[in-house]
Image (tube, rainbow, N blue to C red):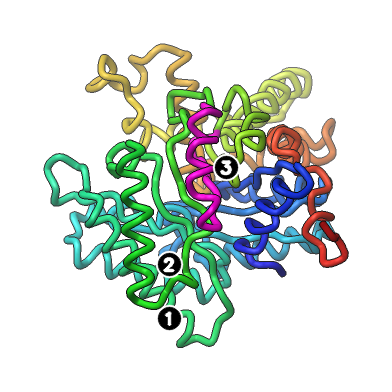
Amino acid sequence: MKTIGSLVRTLIDLRKKRNIKITLLAVCPNSEAVLEAAVLSASHNRCPMLFAATLNQVDRDGGYTGWTQAEFVKKLEIFARKYAWSGELYPCLDHGGPWLKDLHTINNLSLAETMHEVKLSLTASLQAGYRLLHIDPTVDRTIPSGIVPVDLVISRTIELISHAEQVRKQMGLGPVDYEVGTEEVHGGLVDFHHFARFLTGLRDGLEKRDMLYAWPCFIVAKVGTDLHTSFFDPEVAEHLSKTVEPLGSLIKGHYTDWVENPEKYPESGMGGANVGPEFTAEEFNALYDLEMKEIAICHHRTGMKPSYLLKAIENAVVASGRWKKWLLDDEVGKDFGELSPDRRRWLLQTAARYIWTDADVMAAREILYQNLSCVIPDPHRYVVGRIAGAVDRYITAFNLFDSQTLFEPSNEY
């Protein structure tokens, strides 16, 4: 399997020599159905795919998916065999840094404690076979302003990369690639001056340690999108891309969910883009549609008891408290039931990724599938197909269809 860094170098060469413009898709594996759908889509479209797992999703404690790093990679391999796909599927770490795992903040870990935990998770990721590590020390709960000075971001980035490289060599593993930076304002890297300063300082720091071989293939930057903004800014992206391309890197965007103009990503030189909440929302919407069908079936067939899956999802989301992180200013302090129906629906589909493994939700989902099976032979396949359709939208926009061919040894350019 090619390294992700080699894919990035190929993308740069293809753009220069053949005017072929491609952006790699990184799917956030926030549920088993999303992971399966993404592998299915990669197989049907013959394209490489990245899987960017946060420490909230996948970690040594199982995360909210229930997977350790090793279990996640095993699941990925199982789905690759199921869909007979031998092309590149890359397990990756997303947002590896202090306090970026919710429990680190909830448990009020000190800097030393959270850095120690992150390093253990980096080690577990390497042991499991991750191919890309996003190093993101742009949060510091000890700083009142929340803005971490650029020099501190640089030094902690180098510290975490150094740890990963030391562990990788001790374990006798092959090369791993890195992604650095963040689109978050609290990181202090959104301003272009700070962005350029970060790149210069990081390069100087790695060079002093004879570690330029570990230079990141992806630099994350804010390109117009965030949680509440879905318009991608191609002019900003092109400017940033031209800045990092001479360094052998490409820009990677986060918050690509529901973006209005995804076709502009490859045109502006974007190397990669993360999509996550949109796919779990599609999973929620598919299940919602199935429950509407179940209502009809239960009405027609006496003795059949409904699953009440949506109610189980709502109960689990509300009990988790996760929905509160997205409350608007005028909603703070309100109970979930006091919010408008549209807002409740949005919060449910957004927070559903945290509770797919809840026991009551899983049991209700199984009942739903059993009830529907008398009419729909494979409801699970219906859900996976719906998610795969959402993945396909980005594969088409990013010019990824049949792109596996471009990365094969026989391809010459």
Instruction: Give the secondary structure at mark 3.
Output: strand
Percent across and percent down for residue 170 are 45, 87
Which residue is tagged 1? 167
Describe residue 262's horizontal placement relative to residue 298 as left or right.
left
Q: In x, y percent, where is residue 206? A: 37, 69
The residue type indicated by label 2 comes to: Arg
In front of the other: 50 or 35: 50
Report the number of discs.
Answer: 3
Looking at the rendered structure, which numbered label has been put on residue 273?
Answer: 3
Secondary structure beneath label 1: helix
**Inter-mark Cα distance, 2 to 1:** 17 Å
**Residue 260: percent from the left, percent from the top?**
60, 22
Residue found 17% across the figure and 61% down from its top? 110
Measured Cα–Cα span from mark 3 to mark 1: 28 Å
Q: Quadrant of the C terminus?
A: bottom right
Say which quarter of the image contains residue 268.
top right
In the rendered view, does 192 fall on the left or right side of 2? left
Q: Is residue 228 left or right of residue 119?
A: right
Expressed as whole percent of the image width and height from the top left, the position of residue 59 reads 44, 62
